[in-house]
Image (tube, grey):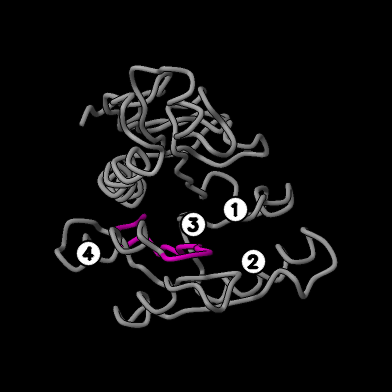
């Protein structure tokens, strides 16, 4: 990143709890990221309030105003590009991205999924894990590609499942894991340690055939 801070756009749709973890880490000097803008497709998203309270610029474009996904995504990109972001962080951004958008920011989009990918892509992961009687659950930070929840995995946080807990209780524990691993993985990118090359994730010049795993 040429010794400058990595310009980071964080995309949200809701309350912004993962966003808050980035804000807190940045305020404590624990991540080398310039949180340049917080974008939402919903004007009522509380994450916009979190950003404003932290002094981070915000932008909002409502997806319902556009006729299709790519048209909306092109408008989003035009707005985000005003900040010239080096990295996009999807933090509860509840939109499936068009191939055009993914290509426009190829290798510069991170997402976090509440499961130990490749297991349990998609929705309702916590209940599905409990129903299946799984021993372990967690969350995965990965690069975004055209394949939904299928991009190269970077970092996973895992925890033991208590089959007596509810899906909401498990969700809360997984979210706590996310708040630790997501800023860490993004910071690797900002430091120039993490990159997307040849459709793979590379950390410190080594191909991540498997993600780094932290147990909580």
Residue at image mark 1? 105
**First reached walking from the N terminus: tag 3 or tag 2:** 2
**First reached walking from the N terminus: tag 1 or tag 2:** 2
Q: Give coordinates of residue 37: x percent, y percent.
A: 44, 73
- Residue 72: within the magenta? no
- Residue 12: within the magenta? yes
Tell me the CA gap for discs 4 and 1: 26 Å
What residue is shown at x 31% (from left), y 27% (from top)? 164
How many marks on residues? 4
Tell me the CA gap for discs 1 and 2: 9 Å
**First reached walking from the N terminus: tag 1 or tag 3:** 3
Tell me the CA gap for discs 3 and 2: 11 Å
Residue at image mark 4? 24
Q: Are the residues at dot 1 and dot 3 in contact (C-beta closer than 8 Å)? A: yes
Q: Are the residues at dot 1 and dot 2 in contact (C-beta closer than 8 Å)? A: yes
Image quarter of residue 10 = bottom left
- Whether 216 is drawn above or below 29: the answer is above
Q: Which residues are magenta?
A: 1-15
**First reached walking from the N terminus: tag 4 or tag 3:** 4
- Whether 166 is drawn above or below 19: the answer is above
């Amino acid at each position: 990143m040429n010794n400058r801070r990595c310009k980071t756009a964080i995309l949200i749709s809701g309350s912004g709890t993962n966003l808050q973890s980035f804000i807190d880490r940045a305020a404590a000097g624990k991540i080398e990221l310039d949180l340049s803008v917080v974008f939402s497709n919903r004007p009522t998203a509380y994450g916009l309030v979190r950003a404003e309270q932290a002094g981070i610029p915000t932008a909002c474009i409502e997806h319902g105003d556009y006729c299709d996904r790519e048209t909306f995504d092109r408008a989003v990109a035009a707005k985000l590009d005003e900040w010239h972001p080096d990295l996009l962080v999807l933090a509860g951004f509840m939109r499936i991205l068009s191939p055009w958008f993914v290509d426009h920011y190829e290798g510069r989009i991170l997402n976090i999924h509440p499961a130990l990918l490749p297991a349990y892509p998609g929705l309702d992961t916590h209940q599905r894990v409990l129903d299946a009687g799984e021993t372990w659950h967690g969350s995965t930070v990965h690069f975004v590609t055209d394949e939904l929840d299928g991009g190269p995995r970077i970092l996973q946080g895992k925890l033991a499942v208590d089959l007596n807990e509810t899906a909401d209780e498990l969700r809360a524990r997984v979210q706590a894991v996310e708040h630790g691993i997501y800023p860490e993985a993004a910071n690797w990118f900002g430091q120039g340690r993490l990159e997307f090359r040849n459709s793979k994730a590379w950390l410190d010049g080594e191909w991540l055939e498997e993600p780094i795993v932290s147990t909580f």
